[in-house]
Amino acid sequence: MGLPITITPISGTVTVAVGSTVLGESTQALELREAGHQPVVYVPRDDIDMSRLLRTDHTTKCPWKGQASYYSIKGKVGMLANAVWTYEDPLPEVSAIAGFLAFYPDRVTVTRG
């Protein structure tokens, strides 16, 4: 059985925001589709205002992608804990997402334009 994940480039601009605060815009975002899950948008780290993110000690492990590290978002009304994840050294089959960030859709608004 093959890898249950596909990664494809997103055409157009992706904007990431918390409330009215834009964290970044990218024309290089990727969409990752994993069997049984909603599609996830991954945005290059270089396109996000990293000064608004704070690295945490939280990690998780995915059998298909590897170990994820997390960031909290410093917002105007406080901290959104572990709202961002990244695979800094993903498994070879999903190496395209290395250096990209993903955001929990219930805490961050990701729009495609």
Image (spheres, rainbow, N blue to C red):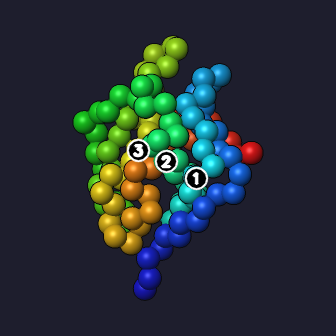
Where residue 28 is drawn, which disc sits there? 1
Q: Secondary structure at mark 3?
A: strand
Name the spot of residue 93 as percent of width and height, x first.
39, 72
Q: Residue at x 45, y 43 (%)?
A: 45
In 3D space, how far apart are the residues under numbered discs 2 and 1 (Cα atoms)? 7 Å
Task: Say if mark 2 contacts mark 1, CB within 8 Å.
Answer: yes
SS of the residue under disc 1: loop
Tell me which amino acid carries mark 1: Gln
Circle 3 residues within 10 Å: few <14, some 14–19, many ≥20: many
Q: Nearer the viewer, residue 72 or 14?
A: 14
Q: Residue furthest top?
A: 77
Disc with the residue nearer the chain's start (3 vs 2):
2
User: Disc number at residue 85?
Assistant: 3
Q: Secondary structure at mark 2?
A: strand
Number of labels in the image equals 3
For discs 3 and 1, the disc positioned in front in the rendered view: 1
Residue 38: x and y in percent read 58, 57
